[in-house]
Image (tube, rainbow, N blue to C red):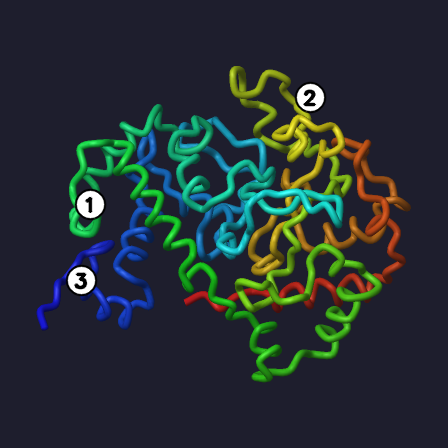
Amino acid sequence: MKRTVILIAGVALLSGSCAKKETGLSEKELVGKAIFFDESLSEPAGQSCATCHTPEKGFADKYARITSEGAMKGLFSNRISMTCAYSAYVPALSYDEEEETYVGGLFWDGRVNSLEEQAAQPFVNPLEMGNENVGDVVRKARSAYWYPDFVRIYGEHASADTVFTYINEVIALYERSAEMNPFSSKFDAWQAGKCQLTEEEKLGYELFKEKGLCAECHILDPDERAGKVLFTDHTYDNLGIPSNPGNPFFKVSAPYNTCGKDTMDLGLGSRLRDPEEYGKFRVPTLRNIALTAPYGHNGYFKTLEEIVHFYNVRDVEDFPPAEYPETVNKDELGNLGLSQEEETAIVAFLRILTDCIK
């Protein structure tokens, strides 16, 4: 049987089943991975998907920044880069009539419904990869080291829109791969009966389920598609997080920011133009949470200890006011009555949700 050798990131790999066996990724996933890490596709060059979603940080920002800087220096997004690990299991945005809440959608505000759409947006966002249009992205792609393998899979196409569609398809395939969704944490090993938790981790787990009310939104039921716990119900909530005075987006000038430090991020409500949803953001997975600091949609909290403490005492200690006060969740956090020891135990439990990075 003839075997074709392909080059991805300068490494010779066997095609077809051989590539899958030796790398754990299919041919398309390998090309998607190459594009994900390719810094030549931004304007100017120097930024890739992995700049804001690197494996070593749980597929969050490489430099653990409050918000990520774009390819053009001095331009920043207004929100922290949410991990894209386990995004494959986020459903499309819909309204749950029974629970009376919105569920699903990608990004913090649910503005797209597929990984393909999610992959496409940063390429032409002036605050991210900075290309003016799809044609600019494809022109760079045609000169990329991975493009011959891409053409071998999809064929050559004159249409830039067609090539761009396939680019986003293979990125999405990589984001659906086991490499980005490994379920390889200590928690998973414990669930499989392969290890034991420490007494502090056990206490943290029990507090997470009960007194801490964490599992109200970061649910412990296995996801129907994943068959594993994702630690999110994909709903939207306003935690009462204050505006972050250190957000570099506040220094970005017009036309990207016309309000300076007075910018108010309305989250899902802005997308839906619904005041009842103002200030609400999608509940993220807690998998790899120990790697993805800072925390909150605007990076207000520097550590896990800080955000757990905020959940516990928001309403009984002196915090700045919420960025958007009218829709703050006052039922499931703010005055939980956790001791310092109990807060520490919850943090210890959260740390066992970190995947083993190969």
Crowd class of label 2 (few under 14; some 14 to 19; many from 20; radius 10 Å): few
Crowd class of label 3 (few under 14; some 14 to 19; many from 20; radius 10 Å): few
- Which residue is rendered at x = 53% and y = 62% of the image? 225
Residue 348 drawn at (x, y percent): 69, 67
Residue 167 drawn at (x, y percent): 31, 43
Residue 23 drawn at (x, y percent): 30, 67
Res. 58 visible in picture: no
Q: Is 352 drawn above or below residue 286 in the view shown?
A: below
- The residue indicated by pointer 3 is 12
- The residue indicated by pointer 2 is 262
The quarter of the image holding the C terminus is: bottom left
**In the rendered structure, which disc, 3 or 2, sits on the residue that comes first in sequence?**
3
The residue type indicated by label 1 comes to Tyr
- The residue indicated by pointer 1 is 147
- Which residue is rendered at x = 72% and y = 34% of the image? 277
Residue 342 occupies quadrant: bottom right
Q: Is 136 drawn above or below residue 315 in the view shown?
A: above
How many numbered dots are placed on residues in this image? 3
Residue 133 drawn at (x, y percent): 33, 25
The residue type indicated by label 2 comes to Asp
SS for dot 1? helix
Task: State how far apart marks 2 and 1 are (Cα).
Answer: 44 Å
Question: Which is more foreground, mark 3 or mark 1?
Answer: 1
**Residue 269 placement, left or right of 163:** right
Question: Which is more foreground, mark 2 or mark 1?
Answer: 1
**Residue 92 placement, left or right of 266:** left
The quarter of the image holding the N terminus is: bottom left
The residue type indicated by label 3 comes to Ala
Task: State how far apart marks 3 and 2 are (Cα).
Answer: 52 Å
**In the rendered structure, which disc, 3 or 1, sits on the residue that comes first in sequence?**
3
Q: Is 36 drawn above or below residue 246 in the view shown?
A: below
